[in-house]
Image (cartoon, helix red, strand yellow):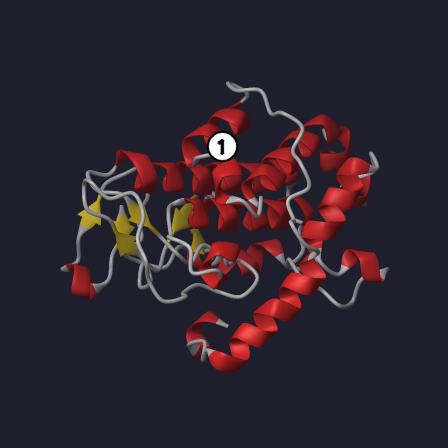
Amino acid sequence: CFWFPANWKRIEIAVCKILLKTEPPFGSLPKFLFANARPNWYQRIEIAFGIARGLFYLHEECSSQIIHCDIKPQNILLDDSFSAKISDFGLAKLLKKDQTRTTTAIRGTKGYVAPEWFRNMPITVKVDVYSFGILLLELICCRKNFEQNVKGEDQMILVDWAYDCFMEGKLQLLVENDEEATDEIKKVKKFAMIAIWCIQEDPSLRPTMKKAVQMMEGAVEVPIPPNPALFPSSIYISFVDQIKASYRWPSAYV
């Protein structure tokens, strides 16, 4: 089940054998994903499937749509079989039955926040899709979305680097020294393409989580994605820094 905060009267929704009443043995995803030893490729993909199916449930199978609003590695818990569980619904938005979008103050975590949060645009389930796309790239590469200690400056921003590798036919660089992933480079390409679709600047271009799951499962073909950025991510980061100056992010989400 998903575990909701007390102000939602401890609503519990049974789904996908997910149980979040206690901390799973392996803790949150960063402890596993960003460890010194690269995690198993197949485990990472199963984690991605678990997150995607969980979001699909929240968006389309609940009686009312739920926007999580803070999908990030720290809010993904793993049990002893590495099954992923979505946690921390403190920032979530519960939509009414006839409602598909909402307006709300900026919420979420830097690096995973969809651009529309900063543009006074209506907020939809597509903000979760964007966050999932960033998280999927991190799962593919076993690295954070922004890192300074990398080989080259062009690799610092994962979104830009992943798209460049895709366009240049160098996706093997994303999984360098990962023999299992390298042996399945076609799947690496497919999941990278899905991630790029999910992080499109234009929310209307992002797939629903249902379609994302279908693409991951191979039930729906994955078309070639366009460049996700309407403007370079480096400029976007500067834009976010300007926003930070006028908005005090809660310490728990930075």
104 sits left or right of 96 in the view: right
Rendered view: 13 above or below 214:
below
Query: From where the camera sits, is residue 245 visible?
Result: yes
Rendered view: 195 above or below 247:
above
Q: Residue 16 location in percent, x, y?
A: 32, 36
Give 240 or 253, whichever is nearer the viewer. Answer: 240
In percent of the image, x 64 and y 66: which residue is there? 237
Q: Residue 182 location in percent, x, y?
A: 77, 34
For this orientation, the residue located farthest to the front is 120
Using a 10 Å C-alpha cutoff, classify the residue at mark 1 as few (fewer than 14 neighbours), some (14 to 19) or many (20 or more): many
47 sits left or right of 123 in the view: right
Q: Residue 215 location in percent, x, y?
A: 53, 26
Please, what is the three-letter code of the amino acid marked with disc 1?
A: Ala
Q: Residue 97 location in percent, x, y?
A: 18, 41
In percent of the image, x 50 and y 59: which residue is there? 113
Give 2 or 42, whichever is nearer the viewer. Answer: 2
For this orientation, the residue located farthest to the left is 9
Rendered view: 15 above or below 96:
above
1 sits left or right of 222 in the view: left
Which of the image's four quarters has the N terminus?
A: top left
Instruction: Tell how many labels.
Output: 1
Q: Which residue is mark 1?
A: 212
Give 135 or 197, whichever is nearer the viewer. Answer: 197
Which SS class for mark 1?
helix
Query: From where the camera sits, is residue 80 visible?
Result: no
